[in-house]
Image (cartoon, rainbow, N blue to C red):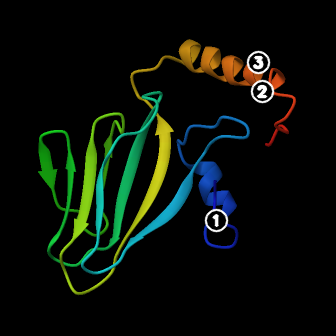
Amino acid sequence: MVAPGLVNPALVESLPVARIPGRAPAVFFSILKAGKRIPPHTGVTNIRSIVHLGLIVPSDCGFRVGGETREWREGEAFAFDDTIEHEAWNDSEQDRAVLILDCWNPHLSDRERAMILKMFAVSETQRPDRPVRG
């Protein structure tokens, strides 16, 4: 979800992010401290593409998705399927900052997106212990 006060809501509304009531969009800043790593991991669904926009990127910061390794570049974005194993590292002496956005997987049609939204809406009605957010 959007961190209160950190991102202009009108700006978020203008982005092509995945909108799933109570679940998405997720728009947040990721700060990776100097000398730290995010170990290899995977996401849970490929209905979304994850977009990283480099904001503060010292040298010696890297990112691996599957067999591809790259560095962030300030002001440049890239997207990936987070169901593919990925990891990040910051071997510099400065913190790294990227903006992360959850967007719809570009291979989904409008009809498929509508079906996914309906599935999530129905699943919420089956969870009386969990209040509907949105």
Q: CA distance from mark 1 to mark 2?
A: 23 Å
Q: Amino acid at mark 1?
A: Ala
User: Which is more foreground, mark 1 or mark 3?
Assistant: 3
Q: Secondary structure at mark 1?
A: loop
Above or below, comparing residue 35 to residue 4 in the picture:
below
Residue 71, located in which quarter of the rendered image?
A: bottom left
Number of on-image labels? 3
Above or below, comparing residue 74 to residue 121 in the picture:
below
Q: Is residue 115 left or right of residue 52?
A: right
Quadrant placement of the C terminus: top right
Label 1 crowd (10 A; few <14 / some 14-19 / many >=20): few
Q: Secondary structure at mark 3?
A: helix
The single residue placed furthest to the bottom in the displayed view is 93
Q: Residue at x 61, y 59 (%)?
A: 11
**Which numbered tag is attached to residue 72?**
none
Q: Earlier in the sequence, mark 1 or mark 2?
A: 1
Q: Amino acid at mark 2?
A: Glu
x and y percent of residue 60 in the render?
14, 73
**Which numbered tag is attached to residue 122?**
3
x and y percent of residue 90 in the render?
23, 72
Q: CA distance from mark 1 to mark 3?
A: 27 Å
Above or below, comparing residue 37 to residue 49 in the picture:
below
Q: Residue at x 62, y 42 (%)?
A: 24
For the residues bearing labels 1 and 3, Cβ distance under 8 angstroms:
no
Q: Which residue is mark 2?
A: 124
Q: Which residue is mark 1?
A: 3
Q: Amino acid at mark 3?
A: Val
Residue 7, located in which quarter of the rendered image?
A: bottom right
x and y percent of residue 88 in the render?
26, 59
x and y percent of residue 41 in the render?
33, 45
User: Which is more foreground, mark 1 or mark 2?
Assistant: 2
For the residues bearing labels 3 and 2, Cβ distance under 8 angstroms:
yes
